[in-house]
Amino acid sequence: MIEKIDVKTVSINSLNYDISIVEKPSIGNEIKDGVINFSDTTIQINKDVSLERAKEILAHEIIHGLFEGMAINNEENVERVTERLLNFIKLNKRVLDFLGDRL
Ligand SMILES: [Zn+2]
C-alpha cells in the first residue's frame, strides 16, 4: 500500500496532469488500478498497490496519454510499450538526462 509518491504532476503532450493516489480509481462503474482522464488532465493510481506496481501503473497511464488520439492507443500496445519503456529507463538514465537537457 502506498500513501503518496514523489511525483505530483507529469507533462504529457504539453498538458500538465495531476497525479493522485486514491482509494478506487474508476472509469464509469469500472474500478481499475490506474486511470488517466484526458478531460480533466488527471492520473489516479490505486493506493492498494506496491511502489513498484505504482511505477508500472504510472508509466502505463503516461503511455495512454502519449498515444491519445492515435490508432495504437489500445491495452495490448500500451502494455508492450510500457514494459519496454520502463526497462529502457532503468538501464539508460544518462541518455534520458542528455535527451531531456534544455538546448
Ligand atoms: Zn490501460
Image: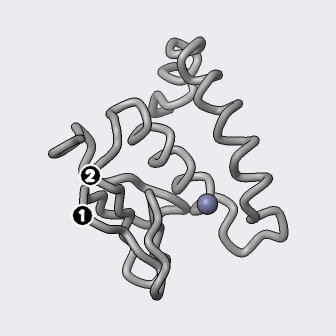
Rendered residue at 45%/33% (across/down): 102
Amino acid type of the residue tagged 1 in the rendering: Glu
Per the rendering, the mark at residue 61 is none
Rendered residue at 55%/62% (across/down): 13
**Badge 1 residue CB within 8 Å of ligand 1:** no
| 23 is higher (above) or lower (below) than 28 | above
Amino acid type of the residue tagged 2 in the rendering: Lys
Rendered residue at 47%/80% (across/down): 27
The percent coordinates of residue 34 (x first, y second) are: 45, 59
- Disc 1/disc 2 C-alpha distance (Å): 6 Å
Q: How many marks?
A: 2
Rendered residue at 72%/42% (across/down): 81
- 19 and 49: which is toward the camera: 49
Residue 60 placement, left or right of 102 = right
Q: Secondary structure at mark 1?
A: loop
Q: Are marks 1 and 2 in contact (CB under 8 Å)?
A: yes
Q: Quadrant of the N terminus?
A: top left
| Residue assigned mark 1 | 23
